[in-house]
Image (cartoon, rainbow, N blue to C red):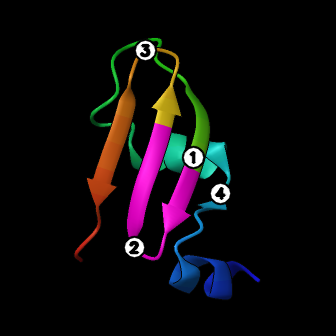
């Protein structure tokens, strides 16, 4: 139901390790991704320090 949930406005949980690698350039040293969600192309990433909202237009 991941695609259907995204279309309906429900975010899907994604693998935090994958996002850790993808966002490693912008994370502070020692910062760890705890939870990550995707809503169609947007990401909501919760780290141990802050919340990252990313609009992935690529």
> Marks 1 and 2: in contact by CB < 8 Å?
no
Disc number at residue 49?
A: 3
**Residue that label 1 marks:** 36
Q: Is mark 2 on a helix, strand or loop?
A: loop
Q: What element carries label 4?
A: loop
Q: Which is the main secondary structure of the residues drawn in magenta? A: strand
Sequence order check, earlier mark of 4 and 3: 4
In three-dimensional space, the C-alpha distance between marks 2 and 1, rounded to whole angstroms, equals 13 Å
Sequence order check, earlier mark of 4 and 2: 4
* Residue at 27% in and 33% down: 26
**Residue that label 2 marks:** 41
In three-dimensional space, the C-alpha distance between marks 4 and 1, rounded to whole angstroms, equals 6 Å
| Residue found at the far front of this picture | 8
Disc number at residue 14?
A: 4
In three-dimensional space, the C-alpha distance between marks 4 and 3, rounded to whole angstroms, equals 19 Å
Pointer 3 local density, CA inside 10 Å: few below 14, some 14–19, many at least 20: few
In this view, 18 is above or below 39: above
In three-dimensional space, the C-alpha distance between marks 3 and 1, rounded to whole angstroms, equals 14 Å
* Residue at 47% in and 11% down: 30
Residue 20 in the image: x percent, y percent? 52, 40
Answer left or right for 56 relative to 15: left
In three-dimensional space, the C-alpha distance between marks 4 and 2, rounded to whole angstroms, equals 12 Å
| Residue found at the far right of this picture | 1
The boundaries of the magenta stretch are 37-45
Sequence order check, earlier mark of 2 and 3: 2
In three-dimensional space, the C-alpha distance between marks 2 and 3, rounded to whole angstroms, equals 23 Å
Pointer 2 local density, CA inside 10 Å: few below 14, some 14–19, many at least 20: few
> Marks 1 and 3: in contact by CB < 8 Å?
no
* Residue at 35% in and 38% down: 52
Return the residue nearer the eye: 58 or 50.
Answer: 50
Sequence order check, earlier mark of 4 and 1: 4
> Marks 1 and 4: in contact by CB < 8 Å?
yes
């Amino acid at each position: 139901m991941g695609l259907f949930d995204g279309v309906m406005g429900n975010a899907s949980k994604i693998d935090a390790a994958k996002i850790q690698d993808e966002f490693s350039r912008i994370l502070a040293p020692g910062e760890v991704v705890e939870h990550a969600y995707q809503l169609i192309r947007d990401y909501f990433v919760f780290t141990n320090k802050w919340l990252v909202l990313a609009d992935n237009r690529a």
